[in-house]
Amino acid sequence: MRQSAPPDRAKSPLSRLACEARRSRRRGRLGQRDDDKLVRQLSLVAFLMAQQRPVTAEEIHEAVEGYGGMSEQAFLRRFYSDRSELEGVGLKLAVERPSDDPFQGDLYAMPPENYYLPPIEFDEAELSALHTSLYLLEGQFAYSEPLRLALQHLTLGRPSPLDDHAARTVAVNLLGSRHTSEVSSHLIKIESAISRRKTIRFRYYSIGRDDLGNREVDPYSLLYMAGNWYLVGYAHDREDLRCFRLSRIQGRVTFKTRAEHDFPPPSEVDLSRYRDRAPWQLADPIGTAVIDLSPTIAWWVDQMFGNQGEYEERADGSGVFRTEYGGEREIVSWVLGLGAEAQVMEPPALRDAALAALELLRTRHSTKPRRRAKPLPRSAEPAQADDADDPAERVVPVERISRLLALMTRLLAACGHSYEAEVSCSALRSELNLTQEALEEDLTLLNLINFGGGCYALFAQVEGDEVVVQKEVYGDQFSRPARLSPLEAKALLWALDFVGGRLPLVGEESLASARRKIEDAVGEASTTGVELGAVQTASEPVGAVLARAVREDRVIEIDYWTESRGEVTKRVIEPHMLMNSRDAWYLVAFCRKAGEQRTFRLDRIRGATPLDEHFDRRVEVEAVPYQPWGTSAQAEQHAQIARVWCSPAIARWLAEEHPSAERFSGGSIIAEIPYASDEWLVKEITKHGGEAVLHTPEELRAAVAGSAERILRHYAAAPARR
């Protein structure tokens, strides 16, 4: 970057070029409504910041770029709308109502505290933690673009240190196949509706009722849970709070009215009823289940689901878990998925349902599968989105006005005390994640922002790989970063909540201390609107041992519960990296017992002990992409495909998770389920209790029947144990 001395402004070729460019660009820009609005809104902010006093609406009408020529009524409507949209990105106009003159209208101002981001002093460890978080979430986080812009505001003028070791030893994947461009489109609209308190309308597929209908909702919050996005809001048709999965919204999401706000700020909303619910608690409770747990599994149930019920441990390590349930099928499925390590004790009707499901499972897998009726003809269905989709279409974009403010601040800060500077185009594209075309379009708009009376903030144009920027008279007004928009603040704090405590950073408190400073600066009101569901990870003491071991390349011994075999074994491992996918964390390591790479799910590590030994990293150990079946030990191992008949009772849910090869008139389907281990597939079929029947591979049908038989013997052996 080059800075120059102040030019002779009366004779500056760049100044003369700026005047001509502005005239031609203004002529060429007429009719581009969105661009006109952005220039008008930013010019409104610039005009108010340049004044030393509050101003009237009439003064704004006369002086601000974009309002001239409007009738009074048209101006008032546009001004009212612009105020609302600016407030939505964190820039709130101060309004004064004079008490001494009842005929004088409101006065408006933009006080410095309403525009500028309060300075935050980060130390090097905190900066490293913040930028490492962005590096890890890049392209794998729906809010990665607002996160990038937030960090640009917070660290303006400071280097971007990256913890190379942490970046190499953590992998994150939050955008699975179910996060499509349509989901991102819904996120954008709903985000806007939440911040502006706008009632929205959409068509929604209710999977429980198998019904597609219209919904009218006051949106309160977004919830990310188990790899899916949900909307929590007041449903007008039900007159109560409801939760809607965004992937089940069909078509467009629209605002109900053109009003600034449609509903008052909601009173305290307890999102825990949605965020912290177990799968069997999604509906209103109909009873309390009493579940007996073996020592092998009891500790895990307490760790993962203790908040969803009451756990009582016995002296031998076994336990009893009591939990309310709203769906019989869901609670039975969960217990069956635990195999012979768990059984339903009460209520009697629920125990009978579990036994009946096991009998049906055994019967349907003890004989050859029945020939099914002819499947229905395939209908034209939209192609499934996958990880090959353009990542830019699967993340929430930043507000354009926030991006323009960030770019303007970056350019003017480069000028410093000089009037002119050069900034690398490639640096700007990298910092703001812009294409060259988008960068040039943004520069065109910035050149039109003025303070009234022909006073502009800057003039900038591209020359080769440099942006030559000239600071105008009032340019210093924008040389400090603007406040974070609610979207940026939420993206930043959401990312810290997600990554916090799981990065093998040198300073373990860096993210926590950075979060506290950010909260103090942006205020609590800017951070509402997104909730994070429970993440499946290790207990805090175990997690701390694992993070240190990865950071220090230290050998550890773990007690690991292998779900498919139902046993806890000791392993000595060399932990190489932590990996996340769909709300679960995994440890990729070299297992000395197996003599090769293994992947361990963190929530199934019961204990971890560091050994007095370090290891040299093995180049052959790499992150294995997580799939919706059991994790594969080797990267080159490909999944096999099982064909599974699903009864109408579960068909819609299975079809949502897996491609459906065939559909039948009664509502059943043949689903194609990928799997990497026989044990995982047997357990997956078992948990559906006869409502899912394995067709192929046929050689595993006997294993499924055997699984049902073992669990039935377990029930028979302890019919009354409490």
Image: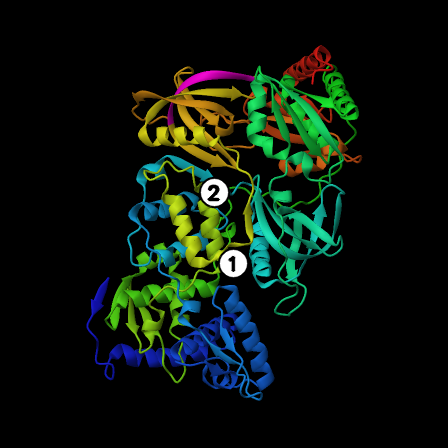
Residue 572 in magenta stretch: yes
Q: Position of residue 695 (x, y in %)?
A: 69, 22
Q: At 42% from the left edge and 33% from the top edge, which residue is drawn?
A: 578
How many discs appear?
Answer: 2
Q: Position of residue 457 (x, y in %)?
A: 35, 75
Residue 353 found in image quarter: top right
Residue bearing mark 1 = 525
Does 58 appear above or below 84? below
Residue 592 shown left or right of residue 98 in the figure: left
Residue bearing mark 2 = 498
Q: Nearest the camera: 623 or 713?
A: 713
Asked whether residue 179 is in view, the answer is yes
Q: Residues within 10 Å of mark 1 (few under 14, many from 20)?
A: few
Residue at far left of view: 5
Q: Nearest the camera: 711 or 447?
A: 711
At label 1, the amino acid type is Ala
Residue 703 shown left or right of residue 214 in the figure: left
Does 474 appear above or below 393? below
Q: Position of residue 395 (x, y in %)?
A: 50, 51
Residue range corresponding to the magenta coloring: 566-575
Q: Residues within 10 Å of mark 2 (few under 14, many from 20)?
A: some
Residue 206 found in image quarter: top right
For the residues labelled 1 and 2, the Cα–Cα distance comes to 20 Å
Q: Do the residues labelled 1 and 2 touch (CB within 8 Å)?
A: no
Q: Position of residue 506 (x, y in %)?
A: 32, 38
At mark 1, the secondary structure is helix
At label 2, the amino acid type is Phe
Does 419 appear above or below 283? below
Which quadrant would the C terminus be assigned to in this image?
A: top right
